[in-house]
Image (cartoon, helix red, strand yellow):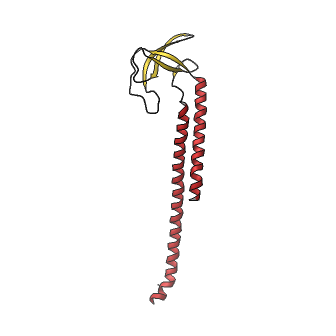
């Protein structure tokens, strides 16, 4: 129990912190490499609804203007958007449409999820080790009991040992 009480929060903290730090750095890199532009939809959004993780799953052709000129390309947009609506489209350093960078809260969510996963994994490992030790100790005690019974049983019953 002491091992579990120490290892469980430690594993959760280490895994959660590492994941949070990694995702935060990834977000910073992507924010530096990508920039948003306002684009106008050329047709209604197609495909299913938005995913529960907050990312956009629908696509539509859009047009936007910047210093080099006017551009058009398919881009991720909200499923509810229709022709003529404006949408924020993210571009990479080369001006190609890309996915938006992760939100600021996504690193925290990923860290918490990984912390819970690490805690569950640690509990399974420690619990499995505990069960293995108990099985081995029980087997040893039963073998010792059998050896002692072989010595004592003939004296109690008057039977001779075989």
At which x and y percent is residue 85?
Answer: 43, 16
Q: Is residue 26 above or below residue 160?
A: above
At which x and y percent is residue 161?
Answer: 48, 85
* Residue depicted at 42% across the width and 14% down the height: 84
Residue placed most toward the observer, 93 or 143 = 93
Could you tell whether 143 is left or right of 18 in the image? Answer: left
Q: Is residue 128 above or below residue 63?
A: below
* Residue depicted at 52% across the width and 57% down the height: 127
Could you tell whether 37 is left or right of 46 in the image? Answer: right
* Residue depicted at 38% across the width and 25% down the height: 47
* Residue depicted at 52% across the width and 25% down the height: 100
> Most extreme residue toward the bottom, as rendered?
158
Asked whether the viewer can see residue 51, the reply is yes
Asked whether the viewer can see residue 160, the reply is no
Q: Give the position of the N terminus as an image quadrant.
A: bottom right
The image shows a total of numbered marks equal to 0
Residue placed most toward the observer, 42 or 159 = 42
Q: Is residue 9 above or below residue 52?
A: below
At which x and y percent is residue 8?
Answer: 56, 51
At which x and y percent is residue 93?
Answer: 58, 20
Q: Which image quarter: residue 13?
A: top right
> Most extreme residue toward the top, as rendered?
69
């Amino acid at each position: 129990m002491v091992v579990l009480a120490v290892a469980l929060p430690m594993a959760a903290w280490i895994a959660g912190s590492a994941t949070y730090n990694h995702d935060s750095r990834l977000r910073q890199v992507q924010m530096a490499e990508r920039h948003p532009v306002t684009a106008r939809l050329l047709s209604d959004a197609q495909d299913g609804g938005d995913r529960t993780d907050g990312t956009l799953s629908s696509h539509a052709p859009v047009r936007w203007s910047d210093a080099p000129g006017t551009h058009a390309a398919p881009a991720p947009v909200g499923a509810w958007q229709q022709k003529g609506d404006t949408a924020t489209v993210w571009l990479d350093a080369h001006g190609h449409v890309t996915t938006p960078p992760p939100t600021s809260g996504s690193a925290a969510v990923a860290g918490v999820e990984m912390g819970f996963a690490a805690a569950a994994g640690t509990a399974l490992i420690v619990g499995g080790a505990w069960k293995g030790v108990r099985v081995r100790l029980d087997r040893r005690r039963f073998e010792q009991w059998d050896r002692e019974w072989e010595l004592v049983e003939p004296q109690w019953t008057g039977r001779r040992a075989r």
